[in-house]
Image (cartoon, grey):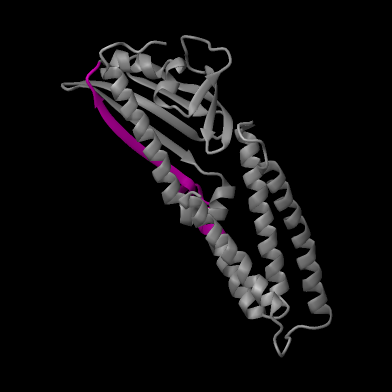
Amino acid sequence: MRRESLLTLGPILLLLGVPIYLVSTEPADVPMQGLPQFALVAAAALVLVPGAIFIVIAIARGSFPVGRIRRIQDVEWTQTCTAIGYGCLVAGLTLAMATTFPAVAGFYAAVVLAWALWNVPPTARRIQYRLRIVARSTPEAAFALVSDPRNWHSYLPALDVFGQLDLPLHIGSVVLTTFRQGRSVISEEEQVVAYDPGRRFGTASRHRRPTDGVYEMARIDEGTEIVWTYWTVLPYSFAVLALPFSRGATRERIIRRRQESLEAIKRLLEAPTPVSV
């Protein structure tokens, strides 16, 4: 199991486990009885039922044969269902907890609300970084390598290009790709947003805006400097569920993969035989 998955599971179990334990504990003196208690229990039930439904939907949508291609929109919708489901469960359990431990329920609700408000703003969900390599090659050769989708698999082994290509690419061109992540194969549409031969090439996800990645090439004494700049804003579902615990691990994984791809680009450009497409 990935480290970020463990970091996500822990807080979720804590958020659900605390109210479940307290709800199952019957205090000697129940502070709420009669109509107030009935109203809270009814409200809790009204929230818990859709929460359970969303969790079931997320589990059903997340169950698929190994190797089956899933659209990135479907993956993010599954994450959204998961976030809504957990949110409803936490809200329902908090209401149920308020019937016996109102003070604890109030504090718990404040903590959960603070968690959500802290991680929802775009600045908290943004991941941005820059990586640099120097290759003994020319900016034109580097641009030719990274701007041709037929070469992408050679330095990004988990990525495949399918469908008809409109070559040479230009601003606005769309490239259909699949990306292997664990047992998942996710399809994505990349749109060219930067195309300046010998200088800049970049693409952006058409369905995860804003998510941009741009190569910049410049001639220097040692050869060609290639700078990769990437930035994205994580979806609300990821932020609410796990951002404060797994953002660092997620960022490290993204950077590590891209650094490996840049090293592969360097090897391809410095190889004695030219890159074939």
Residue 117 in the magenta stretch? The answer is yes
Q: Work out which quarter of the rendered image holds the C terminus and state it.
A: top left
User: Which residue lies at the image location 63% right of the left edge and 74% below the top edge?
Assistant: 106
Which residues lie in the magenta part?
Answer: 116-137
Residue 244 in the magenta stretch? The answer is no
User: Which residue lies at the image location 24% right of the left edge and 17% below the top edge?
Assistant: 137
Query: Residue 41 appears at what percent x and percent y?
Result: 79, 72
Task: Place residue 85 in its image quadrant.
Answer: bottom right
Query: Residue 95 appears at what percent x and percent y?
Result: 71, 70
Using residue 168 as the reference point, say whether residue 224 is left or right of it. left
**Do we see residue 207 in this rendering?**
no
Task: Place residue 272 in its image quadrant.
Answer: top left
**Do we see residue 167 in this rendering?**
yes
Task: Place residue 214 in its image quadrant.
Answer: top left
User: Which residue lies at the image location 72% right of the left edge and 90% below the top edge?
Assistant: 29
User: Which residue lies at the image location 52% right of the left edge and 32% below the top edge?
Assistant: 180
Query: Residue 163 appears at what percent x and percent y?
Result: 58, 16
- How many marks overall? 0
